[in-house]
């Protein structure tokens, strides 16, 4: 935990940090007053810059499907959602409208004198449904979206959000679906300017990022319901690593997933059980998203946790 504290001392807060913090404080205070359960959903990958004036950075595969879909299902279950997401990754509601598809669902009607822009008949009901849900959530002020790009920005915002959420006690829940880098280059070991190829092949030395889950669970937001994710590529490691994570950090739930199958199956690991959640063929045919099942299950567990 001392390592986590050192990390924050040695790194800078992101741009507009105080503005973002105050947005989060207002959001949490409003929902505390209204007794709405609040979930922090983290989503997307974190970047690790190689230069101070960043031209190049290391990134990962995550585009935020898990986080953005889950945020929508938490909203459906009546939660207020603090959505901490990677800039330009998928977001709730707009994720259904990929840019490449947007122009295909629109058409121009009427003549050149008075053309009107319309949504094509076949897309109307889907779009209407999304827009109605989005506007209802906006009106109720139940979705706050906060962006990050780098690993350092993400961790500063995660700590600030967790500390603010701690005022809610058990009513707060954290759903840590972002794909967080384990390696980074500290500022004092990073060149300020663009690395020159004329200097020959590039050798990088990355340092370990302290695991923040320990500080999060023990110091930042100790009464909340905390769900972390464990990502592996080797199926033989998944359950064991998820169990180890649970034992080490002593939070409520680890959801294990394998990179290739993450959209179809996940494993819930708690102190008392190991439960697989899977989509069957019928679910897949009907367009069911695994996040709808994950979130339904978590909402029930969080409800029980609040009653304990
Ligand atoms: O965005 P998608 O394409 O839909 O993909 C979703 C997902 C696969 C990214 C998601 O389901 C997922 O598994 N997210 C967690 C990925 C991850 O960071 O796994 P990990 O095994 O490296 O870390 C385990 C946990 O430690 C994570 O909850 C992470 O928040 C936490 N961590 C990681 C690094 C760090 N320095 N400190 C941490 O506390």
Image (spheres, rainbow, N blue to C red):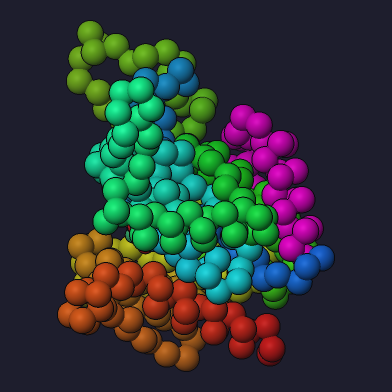
Where is residue 209? Give x, y as percent: 47, 47
Query: In the displayed structure, does residue 266 sit left or right of residue 207?
Result: left
Q: Which quadrant does the C terminus fall into?
A: bottom right
What span is in magenta?
5-32
Q: Is residue 102 above or below residue 115?
A: below
Q: Main secondary structure of the magenta part?
A: helix
Residue at (38% x, 86% y) in the render:
274
Where is residue 253? Give x, y as percent: 49, 76
Viewer-proximal residue, 29 or 226?
29
Query: In the displayed structure, does residue 260 sit left or right of residue 270?
Result: left
Q: Quadrant of residue 252?
A: bottom right
Report the image quarter containing ligand 1. bottom left
Q: Is residue 130 visible?
A: yes
Q: Is residue 262 magenta?
A: no
Where is residue 217? Give x, y as percent: 62, 66
Viewer-proximal residue, 288 or 299?
288
Where is residue 95? Give x, y as percent: 38, 51
Q: Is residue 280 above or below residue 245?
A: below
Q: Is residue 116 above or below residue 260?
A: above
Q: Is residue 22 magenta?
A: yes
Q: Which quadrant does the N terminus fall into?
A: bottom right
Residue at (52% x, 65% y) in the render:
175
Residue at (49% x, 47% y) in the render:
85
Q: Is residue 243 visible?
A: no
Residue at (35% x, 55% y) in the render:
124
Q: Quadrant of residue 230?
A: bottom left
């Amino acid at each position: 935990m001392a390592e986590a504290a050192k990390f924050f001392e040695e790194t800078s807060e992101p741009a507009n940090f105080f503005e973002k913090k105050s947005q989060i404080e207002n959001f949490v205070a409003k929902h505390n007053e209204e007794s709405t359960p609040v979930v922090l959903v983290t989503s997307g990958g974190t970047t690790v810059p190689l230069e101070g004036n960043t031209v190049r950075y290391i990134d990962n595969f995550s585009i935020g499907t898990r986080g953005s879909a889950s945020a929508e299902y938490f909203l459906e279950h009546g939660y207020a959602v603090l959505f901490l997401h990677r800039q330009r990754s998928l977001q709730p509601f707009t994720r259904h409208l990929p840019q490449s598809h947007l122009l295909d669902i629109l058409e121009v009607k009427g003549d050149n004198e008075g053309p009107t822009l319309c949504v094509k008949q076949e897309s109307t009901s889907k779009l209407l449904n999304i827009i109605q849900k989005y506007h209802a959530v906006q009106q109720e002020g139940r979705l706050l979206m906060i962006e990050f790009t780098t690993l350092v920005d993400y961790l500063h915002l995660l700590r600030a959000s967790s500390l603010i959420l701690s005022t809610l006690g058990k009513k707060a829940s954290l759903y840590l679906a972002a794909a967080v880098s384990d390696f980074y280059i500290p500022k004092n070991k990073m060149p300020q300017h663009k690395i020159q190829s004329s200097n020959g092949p590039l050798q990088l030395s990355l340092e370990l990022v302290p695991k923040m889950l320990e500080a999060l669970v023990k110091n930042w937001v100790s009464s909340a319901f905390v769900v972390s994710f464990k990502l592996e590529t080797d199926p033989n490691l998944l359950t064991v690593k998820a169990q180890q994570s649970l034992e080490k950090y002593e939070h409520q739930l680890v959801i294990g997933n394998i990179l290739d199958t993450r959209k179809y199956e996940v494993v819930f690991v708690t102190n008392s059980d190991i439960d697989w959640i899977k989509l069957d063929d019928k679910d897949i045919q009907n367009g069911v998203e695994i996040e709808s099942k994950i979130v339904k299950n978590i909402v029930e567990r969080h409800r029980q946790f609040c009653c304990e």
